[in-house]
Image (cartoon, rainbow, N blue to C red):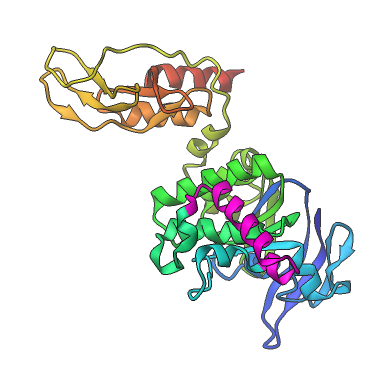
Amino acid sequence: MIEFRDVTKRFDDGTIAVNGLSLVVEAGTITVFVGPSGCGKTTSLRMVNRMIDPTSGTVLVDGRDVLSVDPPTLRRGIGYVIQQAGLFPHRTVLDNVATVPLLSGWSKAKARSRAAELLELVGLPAELGKRYPVQLSGGQQQRVGVARALAADPPVLLMDEPFSAVDPVVREGLQDELLRLQAELDKTIVFVTHDIDEAVRIGEKVAVFREGGILAQYAPPAELLASPADDFVASFVGKDRGYRSLSFVDPSGVEIGTVKTVSEPAAAGEWQLVVDADGHPQGWVAPDGTVLPGGSLYVVGTPIRGALDAALSSPSGLGVAVDEHGRYAGVVTARQVLDVIESHRRG
């Protein structure tokens, strides 16, 4: 558990970066700090591992005041991931990941063995371990950064805008990977971002900071979207917060229909879904035989926002539903999804 007790950080020039922060990050959860530039979210994060010390107040990790712990000792129990990974360019990927275990006194063989396990854990093939950071894509570098932070199996993980430098598609994949890892590893994670969509997607609780380093609201994402604390929070989470809130609506009641599937495009006077030999959707054939790319896919059982996205983005008006392996499971319509949303609201 991480606790901030009336924490203030005032720099030498008089700037107050964090003002009277009090909140508790529960053990084994992902808490996201979000807000505009200069609101104190990164400063708050860095006070946890003593990269910055508070001017007043107390920061506790598992009940211990961080100021009572020698910084190197403190940091050995806290993983740290930053934007653009911050990898050592002159070391191989494997040796980058092995850095912290080596500093902790592990043998080189043991540290490299642990590094190889972690590369597999974050979804990177073993052969990448021999490459240097410059030979990796941005998304691969961020995965290596996460692996390095996990190398000594720290109970706490700090992540400072780790995915902001990659493109949206890669970013979503990294978010998925983080959620998968958290389900497996159960770390206490503090994640900083300026992106409210990212915050509500991965956070179990979200802390919204306003300029001046003041905590404006601290709540689960669904509550944040449904009941903003004030006009600032309402403005920050956006006018489309009602749509974002669909990410937390139970999909029960969404009926999965069917559509004709084919393996080769052919005009037949009706919409047909093209699937490959393994049942993965490839696109649509319009009634006139035109081949069109498909829209987004809805994974059956996930929040209802995905079902509506799939229906609205499909050229046929039929959202494609898939199972957890990405295989065709059926179709949904926007009208049917909206009816389910309306029934939830009435209920």
Foreground pick, 33 / 111: 111
Q: State how many labels appear.
A: 0
Residue located 55% across and 62% down the image: 94
Residue located 37% across and 29% down the image: 310
Foreground pick, 52 / 283: 283
> In this image, 243 relative to 213: left or right?
left
- Tell me, yes or no, whether the highlighted magenta stretch contains residue 317: no
Return the x and y of residue 158 as percentages of the image width and height: 66, 60
Return the x and y of residue 104 as percentages of the image width and height: 75, 68
Residue located 65% across and 39% down the image: 183
Residue located 12% across and 26% down the image: 290
- Tell me, yes or no, whether the highlighted magenta stretch contains residue 110: yes
> In this image, 295 relative to 54: left or right?
left
Foreground pick, 116 / 322: 116
> In this image, 207 relative to 248: left or right?
right
Q: Quadrant of residue 280?
A: top left
Look at the picture and state if 236 lies above or below 304.
below
Return the x and y of residue 68 as percentages of the image width and height: 89, 73
Look at the picture and state if 61 lies above or below 302.
below
Q: Which residues are magenta?
A: 100-126
Look at the picture and state if 211 lies above or below 115.
below
Q: Can residue 267 be seen here?
A: yes
Look at the picture and state if 114 lies above or below 341.
below
Q: Can residue 34 be seen here?
A: no
Provide the major secondary structure of the magenta segment. Answer: helix
